Amino acid sequence: MPGTAKTNTKSVELLRFSTCGSVDDGKSTLIGRLLHDSKSVFEDQLQALERARELRGESSVNLANLTDGLRAEREQGITIDVAYRYFATPRRRFIVADTPGHIQYTRNMVTGASTASLALVLVDARKGVIEQTRRHSYIASLLGIPHLVLCVNKMDLVAFSQGLYEKIRQDFTVFSTRLRIKHITFIPMSGLLGDNVVDRSASMSWYQGEPLLSFLEDVHIASDWNLQDARFPVQWVVRLRDSVHRDFRAYAGQIASGVFRVGDRVLVLPSGRTSKIRDIVLMGRSMKVAHASMSVSLLLEDEIDVSRGDMIVPVENLPYIGKEAEAMLCWMHETPMQPGKKYVIKHTTNSTKGVITALHCRVNVDTMEEERASALGLNEIGKVSIRSATPLIYDEYYHNRRLGGFIVIDEATYATVGAGMLFEPTKVPPLPEYTDYAI
């Protein structure tokens, strides 16, 4: 029965992916079909869908309602906000973000895709590659998502035509040469009928690839993590008072990237103080090695003044550090971004006051051409320069997404008004010099 399958989720890998595309391309229906056919829908959810079908006098259950949770979404038949759903198979765990297709909800799409490793871009087989297809594919590329699946949906409405599918594939392939996406896959499907979603379609025997769920289970994402550049943003300082560590200070947080080992010689930024890792503690247990995405506490051999917002890194592998930086900025608020206005910049665990000193250009996301502009409006994207009150410690975004991303917060309302991606600086400022600073 649906919802009754049990999976040992502790031992399988997690994949975060998002869906995007134009309005009425069938994103919510596809996700509903994926959940339903993979036995990830509970009986009470199915009963609620059946009651909704009866109330509306519909001939069949609307699987889109599994993700379109807002009343306005169900009444209008569109997705307005990002809906997150979790499901699992014996081979992998999934968190899916169903994002809106309307242009005015582009900011919601950015939010949902910002943590994804894979993007599903849906195309209506009757319409082909359109403006919103290019817009959302460009944003997925801008956000550094390494894997993209172009889902040519509603193939049942074009008689499962191979020729039409191949034309759409060719059109997108030509467009995709301008994107920075490592891996692009094409799958013809029908979310409504389930063709090539969980099971292979009998109506498209000409398609020799995997159905969607099999692809999601198999796609290689382990190498998407940056394991070369060890970065540990300090979230808070704790005191360990157990029999092993006595009364010792530890620095807790989530490893953003790379690998840390006991005995590693490390540097604390921005102070420039050096020490060695004495111990790594996870849930009260000491360990020799910890890697990206693990939440741990680091103990250092020396008593150093370390606080929230500082960064612990290897002495031989340093990030950029400076109060001035250049970035690509997605504006997410109705009030336009004005150069010279002060904001709060939230980067990893560090929050600092800052100002957008210059807007170099606005990017036309439909043509990917740069245009002159004096401000950024809602859902617009541009290249900017920023200056912060305290140093930003970062890597170039496309080299290390966790260290290269930041958000912009309005000082007065505390609303998140923008999301940005930091570039490699044209000039690398020197690190602060201290008497005990040695590499």
Image (cartoon, rainbow, N blue to C red):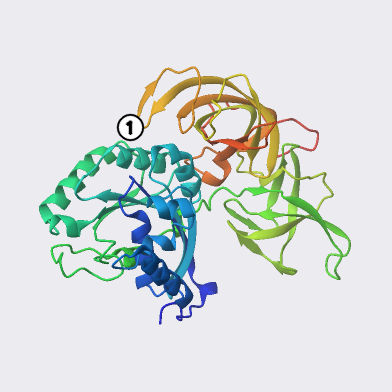
Question: Does residue 175 sit above or below 389 in this rendering?
Answer: below
Residue 265 percent coordinates (x, y): 70, 50
Residue annotated with mark 1 = 366
Q: Residue at x 20, y 48 (%)?
A: 169
Instruction: Tell me the amino acid under the disc marked 1.
Output: Asp
The C terminus appears in which quarter of the rendering? top right
Residue found at the very far right of the displayed protein: 247
Q: Nearer the viewer, residue 302 or 339?
A: 339
Q: Nearer the viewer, residue 298 or 208?
A: 208
The N terminus appears in which quarter of the rendering? bottom left
Residue 175 percent coordinates (x, y): 26, 38
Q: Which of 221 and 213 is in front in this view?
A: 213
Q: Is mark 1 on a helix, strand or loop?
A: loop
Q: Which residue is drawn at 19% across and 46% down?
A: 168
Q: Which residue is drawn at 12% across and 56% down?
A: 161
Residue 358 percent coordinates (x, y): 55, 19
Q: Which of 294 and 148 is in front in this view?
A: 148
Q: Which residue is drawn at 42% across and 73% down?
A: 46
Q: In this view, does 73 lie to the left or right of 393?
A: left
Residue 187 found in image quarter: bottom left
